[in-house]
Amino acid sequence: MRFLFYSILFGIFFPRFVAGQPTLKKITFPNDTTKIEYEYYTLDGQKHGLYKWYYDNKQLRAVGFFKHDKTDSLFVSYFRNGHKKSEVMFHEGAMHGSYKTYFPTGKPEIRGQYDHNQKQGKWVYLTDNGQIERTEVYENGKLISPKPKKEPTVSQDSTDNQNNIESK
């Protein structure tokens, strides 16, 4: 019975000692060490866990999670006025999932999706009064609709020295 007890106790607590425990780090502003600028957890020297970034007025600037030194969750950033600035989903350090930005008034500005740091699918750009300014569609990070405008090129005709404009 005693062996079973110690086996269970060892099995529960020993992995924590081997893997280590997250340590809270607080980084202050250089000009005012009473105010925290960053607050995050580290594990084995890497950011791992909750991450918070503050303005000098102690207001939250951004919050999210790290996993083995890579962003790995929804990161939310804020304007100084407290309204959301952006919501960006990350996976293993890459933007992956929903992407949203806001105007300083808190109204939506851009909506889209990322797939491993590449724009994917429908992206909607709004004006500050909520009207759709434009819509774009991406496939594997490339704009497919509306078609990107082709820039004209200038070529020199060697026979008559005239400039001809032709599309790429």
Image: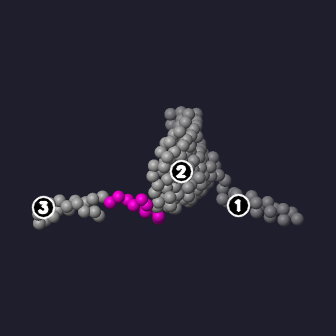
Q: Position of residue 91 (x, y in %)?
A: 56, 59
The three-letter code of the residue at mark 2 reads Lys
Task: Name the outermost residue toward the front.
Answer: 131
Magenta residue span? 139-150
Identify the disc placed on residue 100.
2
Residue at numbered disc 3: 161
Give SS at disc 3: loop
Estimate the spatial distance between the alpha carbons at disc 2 and disc 3, rounded to whole Å.
Answer: 51 Å
150 or 65, nearer to the observer: 150
Residue at numbered disc 1: 15
Q: How many marks?
A: 3
Estimate the spatial distance between the alpha carbons at disc 3 and disc 1, rounded to whole Å.
Answer: 79 Å
133 or 110, nearer to the observer: 133
The three-letter code of the residue at mark 3 reads Asn
Q: Residues within 10 Å of mark 3 (few under 14, many from 20)?
A: few
Kindly identify the residue that appears in the image at 29 percent across and 64 percent down: 168
Q: Residues within 10 Å of mark 2 (few under 14, many from 20)?
A: some
Give SS at disc 1: helix
Give SS at disc 2: strand
Of mark 2 and mark 1, the one earlier in the sequence is 1
Kindly identify the residue that appears in the image at 66 percent across and 59 percent down: 19
